[in-house]
Amino acid sequence: MASGKDETHPTRREALMLGAGAAAALAAGRAAGQEAEGQPLIGNPQLPERPGNRMRWAVVGLGTFGVGQVIPGFANARHSRLTAFVSGNADKARELGARYGVSRFYGYDDYDRIADDPEIDCVYIVLPVGLHAEYTIRALDAGKHVLCEKPMASTSAECEAMIAAAERNRRTLGVAYRVHFEPNNMHVLERIRAGELGTMRFVSADHGFNANPDWPPHKWRLEKELAGGGSMYDIGVYGLNTSLMMLPDDTPVSVSAHYSTPQGDPRFTQVEGGLDWRIRMASGINVQGSSSYCWSPYVSRQRYFGSDASIEMQPATTYYDNTIRLEAGGPAREYSAGNAGDQFAAQVDGFSQAARSGEPHLTPGEMGLRDIRLIEAMYRSADADGQFVRV
Ligand code: NDP
């Protein structure tokens, strides 16, 4: 029925909200009948999956990283959605549940009941390292796929048990090496793979921060039972894993390492405060790195030296602002190849797709085991004053 109002014209409220130019365009569009007929679905063919078809995730451990990065990352996921939280703090879990539309809650005591919950396909373990193996194996035995935070576990024996549990239950196991999904690192890997650096001659990796024993997320990192190891486990593992990612056709043959823990520092009675390491690769090149709990400010630096060009990334493996500096003769070029914040959604989506298809995840349990074995070899070397250890 006619309202007596010119339906092609923006309302006063629309005009105020849109501004003069856009309001005129809206009027022209309505006059042309666009609003009445609408448009077919055009444009981006990569629509996110319908929520009902996505893989459903439980996050275990609602701490700094879980709440700060992992959970918000699901907002941009296309194949994954959050359905459950597992926490020792029921009030916190419910508060977060209200914010993220999550309505299924478990504690550590009734964790095994997830076996009966059809609304959980994948479990993301974001607990202290000493708890990774136990909670991963319990989730796998409950029939769920598991993405476990880095480093994979306290020992290589635990990693092996986790892999065996995945095989026994025919479920996918991944280690959350998010850098493999980070656009700047993916871009650098492409350049290296394309031969743009020439022959790789040397890789170096430095990662560290200053551990504060009074801050709960750092406190457990200084306790061997919960942390597994020291700076090399927690932060050095980024440098180790990222360096090996950039050398896809090469293999470690031996390692050597020295501790760099400051003498008499009361923080380091159980784990090392620093470790400097070197890996001899089968190709004959060396990968060299350092990790520390005694550096300020936070350091995250990767360097790749080739016969024709070199790339430095600083920061290299952070959440938001990774930067690439390419030197190939002439002025250096510093740039970003994408939004580092995308890595969190990309990682859970990559895992969801692997779990659904049965294909191996890009960063499988075997990769986590390899890295823990290398770190164990580094500790053996450092205990023997830097002796080379074959791996
Ligand atoms: P936090 O201490 O901030 O969080 C750990 C959470 O685990 C706690 O909040 C708690 O959650 C739960 N928890 C259960 N038992 C214990 C216990 N005995 N002591 C302490 N916490 C316990 O640590 P982070 O979030 O920094 O680290 C968690 C995991 O994430 C680690 O594996 C770490 O290596 C990894 N990580 C990965 C990063 C990455 O970039 N990939 C960055 C930072 C961390 P609740 O209260 O809900 O029970």
Image (cartoon, rainbow, N blue to C red):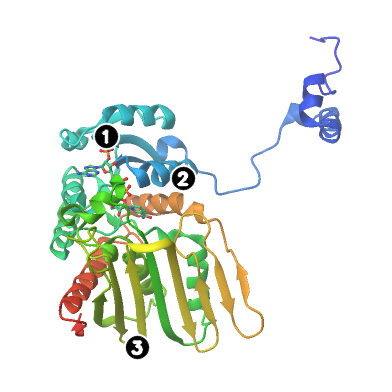
Query: For residue 108, which quarter of the picture?
Result: top left
Give the amino acid at mark 3: Ser
The reply to whether dot 3 and dot 1 touch (C-beta < 8 Å) is no
Placement of 261 over or under 210, stated as above or below: below
State the image coordinates of residue 145 (x, y, percent, origin top left): 26, 48
State the image coordinates of residue 381 (x, y, percent, origin top left): 19, 79
Give the amino acid at mark 1: Pro
**Tag nearer the camera, 3 or 1:** 3
Q: CA distance from mark 3 to mark 1?
A: 48 Å
Q: CA distance from mark 2 to mark 3?
A: 39 Å
Question: Horizontal placement of 88 versus 97: left or right?
Answer: left
Helix, strand or loop status at disc 3: loop
Q: Which residue is mark 2?
A: 77
Q: Which residue is mark 3?
A: 283
Placement of 286 over or under 221, stated as above or below: below
**Tag nearer the camera, 2 or 3:** 3
Helix, strand or loop status at disc 2: loop
Q: Which residue is mark 1?
A: 118
First in sequence: mark 2 or mark 1? 2
State the image coordinates of residue 273 (x, y, percent, origin top left): 27, 65
Question: Horizontal placement of 33 versus 184: left or right?
Answer: right
Where does the N terminus fall, quadrant-wise? top right
First in sequence: mark 2 or mark 3? 2
Placement of 29 over or under 151, stated as above or below: above
Query: For residue 61, which quarter of the picture?
Result: top left
Helix, strand or loop status at disc 1: loop
Give the crowd class for mark 3: few <14, some 14-19, many >=20 residues within 10 Å.
Answer: few
Give the amino acid at mark 2: Ala
Question: In percent of the image, x 44 and y 41: which residue is there?
Answer: 72
The answer to whether any part of residue 125 appears in the image is no
